[in-house]
Each structure stands twice: as structure tokens, then as C-alpha cells.
Amino acid sequence: MTTPHALPAAADRTAARPVVVVGDANVDLVLRGDVIPRFGQAEQLADSGDLVLGGSASIAAAGVARLGVPTRLVARVGADAFGTFTLDALRAAGVDVSAVEVSHDEPTGLSVVLSTPGDRAILTVAGTIPTLTGSHALAVLDGWDGPPGVVHVASYFLQPRLAADLPAVLASARARGWTTSLDTNWDPAERWTGLADLLPHVDVLLPNRNELRAVAGALGAGPRDAPSTGDPDVALARAVAARGPRVVVKDGARGGWSVGPAGAAVHAPGLAVDVVDTTGAGDSFDAGYLAALAHGIEDEAERVRWAACAGSLSTLGPGGTGAQATLAALRAALA
């Protein structure tokens, strides 16, 4: 077992297992300040606005790459200014974008994020986001010429064509020795369909508490399954874990926790930080956990510590990637 806070002897991009992230690539326009809209042609003055890399998959990929892991993104963008911005931002973070398709038929996705220190609202124009297919992801895995690593999928409910193929994609990946990971993110339609067939092929599921409750409810677990004492969400997580994956829960300022189908939950606190923007904090949490897997961290408590720390540090700057930790910064914060 790896000593807490320690890395394998050569923790760099050549030593870590690769991570392939599959999902959304778009731009975010993040507005902060007085951002609650008032209709009736009222003009409001916001404190700040930043055009930044968006998309749960893209933010997670950037976070993993910054933590010293060879990272490739499988996604689609448009042949427009936002698509160029997205690809440039990913390259700057160290992400391999050779598997990002450029479409001449659809625009790059765009999200407007209305951000406050404690919460945010998101308005999204989907663009190329729903057009990614499972066949494209399979083609990337078919052509892989190195050792297997981790396949992480994000924004499941925004990508129906990918979602339809995902059980087969992840089953194929696992058969080739890949570890599989999923962050569904929120379902805008709030139907939460398809997960019963998918979760048996998932090794790690990364919801937040609200998403955990929704997923558990869709699978038939609910308050009646929770004990009268302790954290009822842990019981829901165990019920979901019984379908296959380890459930690693993002818990906001409290950090995060992890649970399998049996045994106690493993908790890790977040860092006490002066929050600038919570956009993408959950995706950076994912990145911390995935990087710990890629670097060979075997202790589950330490993996959750990596995740909670990475999520906390990401809130120190605007947008999802503005303050993402490097490997050196994460190690310093853990110490």
C-alpha cells in the first residue's frame, strides 16, 4: 500500500497510467456579482466576466493533465472561434486533443454560468455536445497502442448518442484492462434513465450528494432504505455500489467520501479556502481522484484526499480551470 501523501518513485507523465476522458468540450462565460436575472428589460452590472474552458469532461481532463498524467480527450467542437478557444485551452493544460473531432455542421457548445460564492446557475446551448458517439470512443480505444489506464466519461445525460452506446463501450474497455469511471452530472430532464444497464460496467461513480439521491431513487433505493441513525446518504451510496461501482461522493466544502457495497465510508475533508468561483470544482474533484488512480495510489482514503484537495484548490480562481492544482501544489496542500 502506498504511504500517505507519497507518490511512486517517478510520478510524472511517463510513469502514470494514461487517462482517456470522454464527453463534452465547450466554453463557459462565467459572470459573478449581481447575477440573479431581473426581467422587464432591467440592466444589471456584474462584478466580472470571464470566457474560460467549459464542459465537465474538458475541465476534468485539464485537471488530470495538470496533475502529471498523460491525458487524451474524446469530444467534438465546432469549426468556429469557440472551438478554437476550447482546443487552445486544452492544449495549454497539457491535454492531447488528437481525438477531438471538429464539426463544420454544428457550433461549439456554450454555457453561461451565473456564479455566486455558494451556488451557481448554468444556461447551456448544446451545439456539438450531444453529437459525440460511442463509436468514436471505441475507435480511440481500438487504436490505442500503449498500456491501458482509466476511461472517464462525463455529462452522460447531455450526450444521448454516446449514452446509448456506453454500456458496450465500457464493457469493451474493461475487457481490455481499462478502469472505468463515470460522472453523470445532473439530468436536465430529471428522468435518470439508462443507469441500471450501465453501472455494472462502471468501476468508479462520482456523483455529488444531490446526484447520488437522484441516481439511487431511479434505481429503486430511497429513504426507506436509509437507517434512522448516521448519514442516510451512505446507505443510498451502498445501494448504488451494489450495482457495481465504488461510489465516490463530492460533498462541497465538507470534502468528499467513498463507499463500496459493504464497509464503512471513507471521508476526507476539504481545504479551508477563500472561494472565488465554484464552477468546475466537482470536475476538479474528479480529476484528483482519477490522478490518484493513474499514479498508483492504492489507499482509498488517500485517493479521496487527493480528490477533496483538488476540488478545494480549484475554487481559488475564476472558471473551472483557472486555479486547478499542479502536482506540486497538490502535494504541498496535502502535506
Image (cartoon, helix red, strand yellow):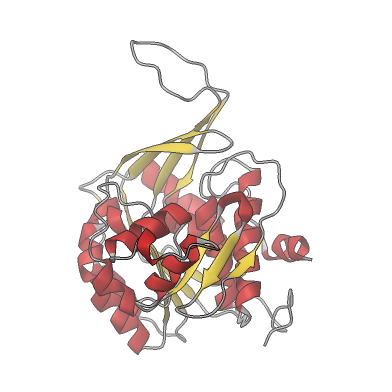
- Left or right relative to 83: residue 193: left
Relative horizontal placement of residue 246, taking residue 143 as reference (left or right): right
Query: Which residue is at a point 35% across and 56% down the rendered structure image?
Result: 214
Residue in the picture at 52% in, 22% down? 34
Q: Position of residue 126 (x, y in %)?
A: 28, 45
Picture quarter with the N terminus: bottom right
For the C terminus, the image quarter is bottom right
Q: Where is residue 41 drawn, in percent x and y?
A: 35, 10
Residue 213 at x, y percent in the picture: 39, 57
166 or 62, which lies in front? 166
- Compared to residue 112, the image places residue 107 above or below, namely below
Residue 74 visible to an observer of this rendering: no
Splitting the image into 4 quarters, where does residue 235 fall? bottom left
Residue 29 in view: yes
Q: How many marks?
A: 0
> x, y percentage for residue 309?
66, 59
Whether residue 264 sits left or right of residue 39 in the image: it is right
Outermost residue toward the front? Answer: 228
Q: Residue drawn 24% across and 78% down?
A: 168
Name the image quarter holding residue 21: bottom left
Q: Residue at x 22, y 70 (%)?
A: 165
Residue 39 position (above or below residue 206) = above
Q: Quadrant of residue 145?
A: bottom left
| Image: 149 above or below 162 | below
